[in-house]
Image (spheres, rainbow, N blue to C red):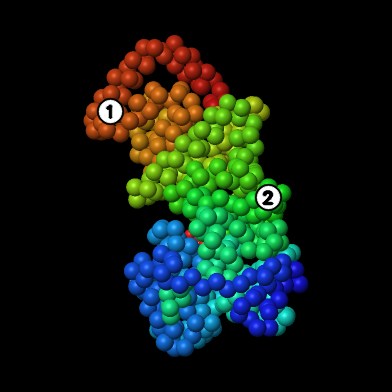
Amino acid sequence: MPFGNPVSPTGIATINSPVATPFTLRVIPRDQHTISRKDISPNALRVLYRLREAGFGAYLVGGAVRDLLVGGRPKDFDVATDATPEQVKQLFRNCRLIGRRFRLAHVVFGREIIEVATFRANSDDGSGDREVENGMLVRDNVYGSIEDDAVRRDFSCNALYYAIEDFSVRDYTGGFEDVLARRMKLIGDPEQRYREDPVRMLRAVRLAAKLKFDIEPATAAPIPRLAGLLDEAAPARLFEEVLKLFLSGHGVASFEGLERHGLLPALFPESAAALKSNRSGALRRFVVEGLRSTDARVANDEPVSPAFLFALLLWPAFCRALIALQRQGLAPEEAQRRAADRVTLHQLTTIALPRRFSLPMQEIWLLQSRFASRQRKRVLRTLTHPRFRAAFDFLVLRQVASSEHEADIAFWREAQQQSGHELESALDAAHAEGMEDEAPRRRRRRRRRSGTAAGE
Ligand code: ATP
Ligand code: MG
């Protein structure tokens, strides 16, 4: 058994972590912490009280306790209990049971869902519902005590329990001190815990970015060496994790954290390679600027889209693939299409980007080359393209990496503001000018086209 966790016979006071470090229960009474019931969702309180009244243990746990302790506003409230999912279901009419890897009860109140999980254990005598493949947990439904539940969580700051019966915080892993010191610390042996679930490496970086915590040295040390284990993680899970990393308002900090801990190549191998070989640093400036503007949008409650995010993160890979294909002698439009397809396809082996996002991502890329054209028909087609606005915002960001887009940005900014009539006359005027300037070239091209129609 790769991650045994022997529980002491007395159960309560002292327990053993996966590396046999003893943990002692520390109870932090109400007057020594800052969590107040008025900051807890009324629906979560309802669930806690109902479980308690039915004689079960009921605790607020995980991210919500942590966020409340640092003065943040939790985005969801999770409950842990010694009631089994079936027992929870019997207590709440508005309850459904979900999940295979983790069997959970969801208590549904309109748009808010309170997740209720039964205490789980790491230790397994073989009789529980657990399945491990290549050292990774694929199913984990072995129930246990609250102490077991605490040590199987990832970071100590995520393993705190707020008890509804006396409003105390229960700490089995030293998490309370770690939250006060703003420190991410993995419970147990870091390497073993990353091997069990490599996504924990991303969670370390993401939560440190979100909470402005430091990752303590022993927790950070193995990450660069083990980053490659993310190859084994489920691509759909990585997609969700990437959205949380970059679309929660701390995208720049997440990006810098991934860079610092050597995780960027594991998530975006081709973009990481392109960024590394881009000596001027222009591509990196572009990505960081894009993430900064995404963070600003999140802060202003403006919508952000996964398609735009991935267009940004994979742009370095796209540029690199495009240059390689053009060097092979492909015509620009063909090279762009192929580069877009190639980058998308390669990326899909790591992160499951759904087509409803990868298609608009590609459109954002392919529209970039259209911004140089002032040809009447093309201008109108570009302006009415459903992805125009996103592609234009993308062009504005590219200005950070290279100032050559200034004239295009000015033209398209104006084009959007003009009425249809104004735009048509402006284009007519531009067209007339262009006819004079370009007359000799146009004539030559026309002659050539009539000779070799298949050539273009
Ligand atoms: P946030 O919701 O702010 O992103 P969170 O810590 O609440 O952060 P969730 O994914 O909602 O993250 O997980 C809830 C809790 O479940 C965590 O606080 C942690 O205790 C536990 N947990 C989540 N993922 C893991 C994991 N991979 N390994 C061990 N425990 C985990
Ligand atoms: Mg959460």
Across and down, in percent, residue 416 comes to 30, 34
Disc 2 to disc 1: CB gap under 8 Å = no
Q: Is mark 2 within 8 Å of ligand 1?
A: no
Residue 424: which disc?
1
Front residue of 381/266: it is 266
Q: How many marks?
A: 2
Instruction: Choose between 314 and 211: the one closer to the eye.
Output: 211
- Residue 138 showing in the rendered view: yes
Q: Is residue 427 above or below residue 46?
A: above
Q: CA–CA distance between discs 2 and 1?
A: 61 Å
Residue farthest toward the right in the current orientation of the protein: 1
Q: Viewed as shown, does residue 449 lie left or right of 376?
A: right
Q: Is residue 236 visible?
A: no
Q: Quadrant of the N terminus?
A: bottom right
Rendered position, 3 above or below 396: below
Residue 144 image point, x, y percent? 61, 80
Q: Measuring 64% from the left and 26% from the top, which residue is drawn there?
A: 327
Which residue does the image show at 50% across and 38% down from the upper left? 288
N-terminal of the two: label 2 or label 1? 2
From the image, tell me which residue sits under label 2: 221
